[in-house]
Image: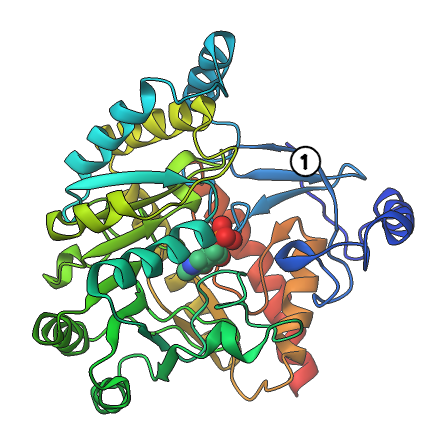
Amino acid sequence: MQLNKQHNIKLAKDLSLRKRAETFIPGGMWGHMSVKKLPHGYPQFFSKAKDARIWDLDGNCYIDFMCGYGPNLLGYSNAEVDHAVNEQRKKIDLGNGPSALVVDLAEKIITIVDSADWALFAKNGTDATTTCLTISRAATGKKKILVARGSYHGSAPWCTPVATGVVEEDTSNLIFFEYNDNASLEAAVQDADSDLAGIILTAFRHDVRRDQDLPKKAFLKKAREICDKKNAVLILDDVRAGFRLNKSGSWFDFGVKPDLTAFSKAIGNGYPLSAVVGVDKLRQAASEIYVTGSFWCNATSMAASLKTLSIIEEIDVVGHISFLGNKLRAGIDQIANNLGVGISQSGPPQMPLILFKDDKDFSRGKKFVQYLLGRGIYFHPWHNMFLSLAHTAKDVDITLDAVEFAMKKISLEIK
Ligand SMILES: Cc1ncc(COP(=O)(O)O)c(C=O)c1O
């Protein structure tokens, strides 16, 4: 498989489609998949993806470290998952009610995830996090939800990071605090007074454009203690990290059990699905709320998820991506040290983030990823990246060669 050797790869077809898109799509593209904020050189459109490789419209091939922003845990077009989907499609996908797979999948997820006594399914991560808030309020009869400042929980009006079109009432029952800061959390609890319905937390601090932080055990324990004391619900938003840190749930190793967990992204290896799982005490509330969507019960997505979860039960996916993530991290550290380039690598190695020191405007980071694109490596300058089961040690070696090339360029530019 030929990767690009040249900087300034050609994107003629991509650029021409972007022009057409400007006519038919507001702004040419919306949301996180718009490349408008990324440095020049990123393709907007893709034509093909397999395992850890992705091809743009112009035929340039990249070793991909975004996995479609997370979902492709086993790699693109995993043969077993695709087969399960295709077989299911021949029977039924969307009917007047769900297929039997909905029960199989709920049972499967309950056997895998530690804090799951029941499960319900939706489509996007935002559906799942929003449903968690609704269940929390239904169960407690209270309104206030505590949210860590800067955490991403989706794009509904209560949680979108862009305030355009959002009205005060959408967020008036949220109280913000700092992730990993007990005093700040306790101050928010005081503000909520007797109206605390729940605390929502991402698995670790993976806000964009800053170093990532794993949760402090004492912080998670404090959140658990507060929820127990105040009859509030502890919600784990595991949409991004789910099944990459620990298949039993991302806080399993911390010994802290959430009341509700939102999953999506990796749960169906790229097929659209999300899940809310919860503990028994919230079963009643979850059965009383009304949440649904025309496509929430598609059987093909459930088939994809059942196969994905079966694979992660059999294969140590977390072990594989941790091993490769550590190899990548160690190699990048060594290259940067040798060249005297200041960088920081943070968060779990299987979800890497590389930022440059003294790079407030991300100019170094932007150049770095541009050089890498030119060498057939797709990195992101400020969003955490993702490894998959399809990445290999060879892919990491090829990537490290490209990183050395890019860092050398950066080091010459710094001098
Ligand atoms: C932690 C977290 N929660 C929720 C969401 C929202 O998921 P979706 O984009 O599928 O609605 C995301 C998406 O990136 C996320 O990273």
Q: Position of residue 110 (x, y in %)?
A: 18, 37
Left or right placement of residue 395 versus residue 203 in this view: right
Nearer to the camera, 79 or 22:
22
**Tally of marks:** 1
Quarter of the view holding residue 405: bottom right
Quadrant of res 325: bottom left
Residue 365, relative to residue 373: is it above or below? Answer: below
Locate residue 148 relative to residue 368 in the image: left or right. Answer: left
- Is 104 in front, or is 51? 104
Q: Is residue 243 visible?
A: yes
Tell me where residue 223 appears, x and y as whole percent: 18, 74
The C terminus: image quadrant: bottom right
**Closest to the observer, 170 or 255:** 170
Q: Residue at x 39, y 77 (%)?
A: 174
Name, please, the residue furthest toward the top.
Answer: 90
Q: Which residue is mark 1?
A: 2
Residue 376, x across and y down, in percent: 66, 48
> Residue 366: x, y in percent?
66, 71
Amino acid tagged 1: Gln
| Quadrant of the image occupied by residue 203 | bottom left
On screen, residue 220 versus residue 59, left or right, reads left
